[in-house]
Amino acid sequence: MRSLVKNNLNIIVAGFGCCKQEILATTGPTYDISRFGVNFVSVPEEADVLVIQGFYNEIGEERLLEIYSRMKKPKWVIATGKCIVDRCLLNEDYNFTERLGKIINVDFYVPGCPPRPEAFIYAVLRLLEAGQ
């Protein structure tokens, strides 16, 4: 894994699906992910971490690759949810790893349908820990 030399992370979330609600729940008072120096951004150029979740079609894949290419280096990727980690529930023929795995290097996988906010926070903390 590439070295992380930061005390905070800016995260951008891509994709369509139910995992996004669980990821964004980490910003609320119950989990307060910002206490760890984690912020959510909407502009790829400001993001350190790309969170890939949900389901994709060809247009969605193009948009995902655009977001990934616009991120500054160094950059990290967290793949979240069953649709990305294994197979898409809405299209079982779709497999993210087979289609984009050679282009986008995934640093952490967070399984679940949808994964619990605690699981997502754990992956982010492991990413921060890896850089220290």
Image (cartoon, rainbow, N blue to C red):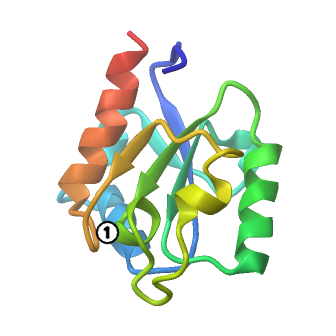
Horizontal side of 110 relative to 119 (left or right) equals right
Q: Amino acid at mark 1?
A: Glu
Q: Position of residue 119 (x, y in %)?
A: 22, 51
Q: Nearer the viewer, residue 40 or 2?
A: 2
| Residue 114 percent across, percent down from the top left | 28, 72
Q: Residue 118: in sight, yes or no?
A: yes
Identify the residue at horizontal 76%, vertical 56% (top origin). 65
Q: Nearer the viewer, residue 119 or 97?
A: 97
Which residue is under mark 1?
22
- Farthest residue toward the bottom? 90
Image position, residue 126 (x, y; %) = 30, 29
Q: Is residue 32 visible?
A: no
Q: Is residue 30 above or below residue 121?
A: below
Which residue is at 50% across, 87% downward? 91
Q: Is residue 59 above or below residue 101?
A: below
Report which quarter residue 86 is drawn in.
bottom left
Local secondary structure at mark 1 = helix
Q: Residue at x 71, y 45 (%)?
A: 103
Please tell me which residue lies in front, 48 or 84. Answer: 84
Residue at image point 46% right, 53% down: 79
Q: Position of residue 44 (x, y in %)?
A: 73, 49
Report the side of 19 relative to 107 (left or right): left
